[in-house]
Amino acid sequence: MYHNPMLELKCGDNSYPLQLAPEHLLSVLSPRPIQRQGTPVELIERALDSCAGSLASFASGDRVVIVTSDVTRPTGSEIYLPLLVSRLNSVGIKDRDIEILIALGIHRKQTPAEHKRIVGELYGRIKVTDHDCDDPGELVYLGDTMRGVPVEVNRRVTEADRVILTGAVTFHYFAGFGGGRKSILPGVSSRKSCMASHFSLLNPEEGGGRHPKAVTGSLDGNPVHEAMLEACGMVAPDFVLNTALGPDKHIIAAFAGEWRDAHLCGCRFYKDTFSAPIDEKGDLVVVSCGGFPKDINLIQAHKSMEYASRALKPGGVMILLAECRDGYGNATFFNWFGHETCAELESALRKRYEINGQTAWSVKEKAERFRIVLVSKLPAEEVRTMGMIPATTLDEALQLALPMLPDRYQAYLIPEGGTVLPVMQT
């Protein structure tokens, strides 16, 4: 609990000071203080030591594929990949038998400079390949999950003698958490598989909305997570190395071992560290994504909107600071708001599913449940079309919000909305 602090809330490269009267401030929601247990290198080495048995089973001549994330997902790969390759070399595996596969999902290919950022000192030494979700010649069908998701994955992981998954554990707004099994689906899966797995976040019946278990920070009964688990099990990777990063994007923890157990351990750590317990919901939430590049576009900023909504009463007011200097983040994203209601958008989504359309639906769903004042560079009329209220500064947003609030309103402030998940204590 905080007592009337003066905060600087970021929006793009700008910072806006904000101080609420004590009688209005419930709390400032931030991650728990992070007690680093070593340098990033020490944390990775310790994690790899913990799964030395798995590495000991590797042998000279084994063809090894290491799956890792693209540049849109900071993981510390430039630190952990060289350390991991060094361990492989130490058990007799040659550089020529190691390949790093970038888990693009449906994202664009990476540039050479981006490859260098991802693999660090390994650049030019170890082969690096981008996954292509649309190349049928590079995909292998492994079967369907119990809920009918077709599992088509990159041929390299099916033909390798050993598969290692790497990446970062984070919150994910409908898969529960990133990391672990997500390296396979959607990471190195076909576009068809990616779409089908994401579609499982919706209830089967028309107009049923989101499955109640497909939510941030939850894995139990989550249908998207379960589809990812099944797909990963079909590949049967040898082990996983996952990191957790602080708000400064530096490694604060690492987890390695059996791909299910190590990932779950990482999820527990991440939830404990980045959840903010609350005893009641507020009338107002003022949330910043944390400034550029965290608010580079609306699709990225949606994470902060989603998490912050956990702390808001139905019909409450959210002020979201998200500059969105690059617009929406996808050329067709705004087109989905041609549907006037959330129900109409959902119906269209069921007929022609797109991942970005599903994010648009999630934005619209919150715009209908709450009153959202968006501080951004997006055109005001387009913000209104999405069901939100446009503002250009925090002061303007507060002036717009106050008439919508009760006299004795209660508010939460969230300076780093992309990394903090408010959780009601029951």
Image (cartoon, rainbow, N blue to C red):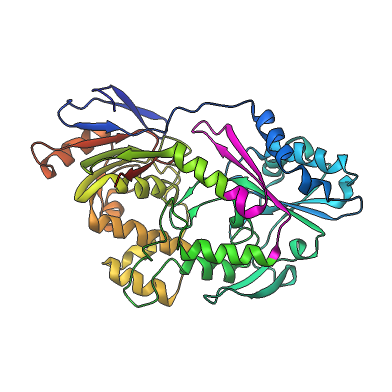
On the question of residue 31 being in view, the answer is: yes
On the question of residue 169 being in view, the answer is: no
Q: Position of residue 131 (x, y in %)?
A: 69, 58
Residue visible at 70% across and 64% down?
235
Judged left or right of residue 333, residue 154 is right
Q: Position of residue 94 (x, y in %)?
A: 90, 46
364 inside magenta stretch: no
Q: Residue 87 falls in which quadrant of the image?
A: top right
Residue visible at 50% across and 41% down?
270
Judged left or right of residue 29, residue 131 is right
In-front residue for pair 182/381 = 182
In-front residue for pair 222/209 = 222
Magenta range: 235-263
In-front residue for pair 395/51 = 51
Q: Position of residue 143 (x, y in %)?
A: 65, 76
Judged left or right of residue 395, residue 113 is right
Above or below, comparing residue 292 to residue 341 in the picture: above
Judged left or right of residue 88, residue 236 is left
Image quadrant occupied by the N terminus: top left
Above or below, comparing residue 407 to residue 299 in the picture: above
Q: Position of residue 105 (x, y in %)?
A: 60, 59
Q: Residue 121 falls in which quadrant of the image?
A: top right
